Amino acid sequence: MAFLPIYMDETNFDKIHSISDRELTIKEGLFVGNSFGAAFAAAMKEAAKASSGGEYRCDIPGFQ
């Protein structure tokens, strides 16, 4: 995130990731909005660190 709003309670989150605006376009070829892009990029970063055989979930905002 570029900034954290004063009303945001950081204790509700396990981690907060920062990504560039173009990261998904350059690395994955995806042209998506900010919410989708941020959720997907963070999920990919966490998946890269995860052990094999585990199950993970990423809720993508506005994706149906």
Image: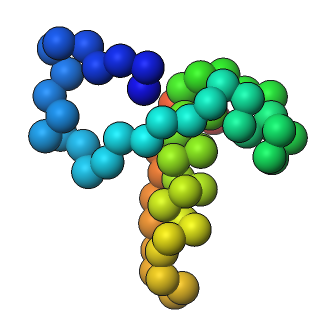
Residue at 59% across / 44% down in the picture? 40
Q: Position of residue 55 (x, y in %)?
A: 46, 74
Q: Is residue 31 left or right of residue 50?
A: right
Image height of 38 relative to 44, above or below: above
Q: Is residue 62 left or right of residue 54?
A: right
Q: Position of residue 1 (x, y in %)?
A: 42, 26
Q: Is residue 6 left or right of residue 47?
A: left
Q: Is residue 33 left or right of residue 53?
A: right
Q: Residue furthest top?
A: 6
Residue 60 makes an appearance in the image: no
Residue at 54% across / 85% down in the picture? 52
Residue at 62% across / 30% down in the picture? 20
Quarter where residue 4 is shown: top left
Residue at 57% across / 68% down in the picture? 48
Q: Position of residue 27 (x, y in %)?
A: 80, 46
Q: Residue furthest right?
A: 29
Instruction: Looking at the picture, tell me which residue is in the foreground, 36 or 51.
Output: 51
Residue 8 makes an appearance in the image: yes
Q: Position of residue 42 (x, y in %)?
A: 51, 47
Image coloring type: rainbow
Image height of 59 relative to 20, above or below: below
Quarter where residue 62 is shown: top right
Image height of 2 relative to 9, above or below: above
Number of numbered discs present? Answer: 0
Q: In which quadrant will I find the C terminus? A: top right
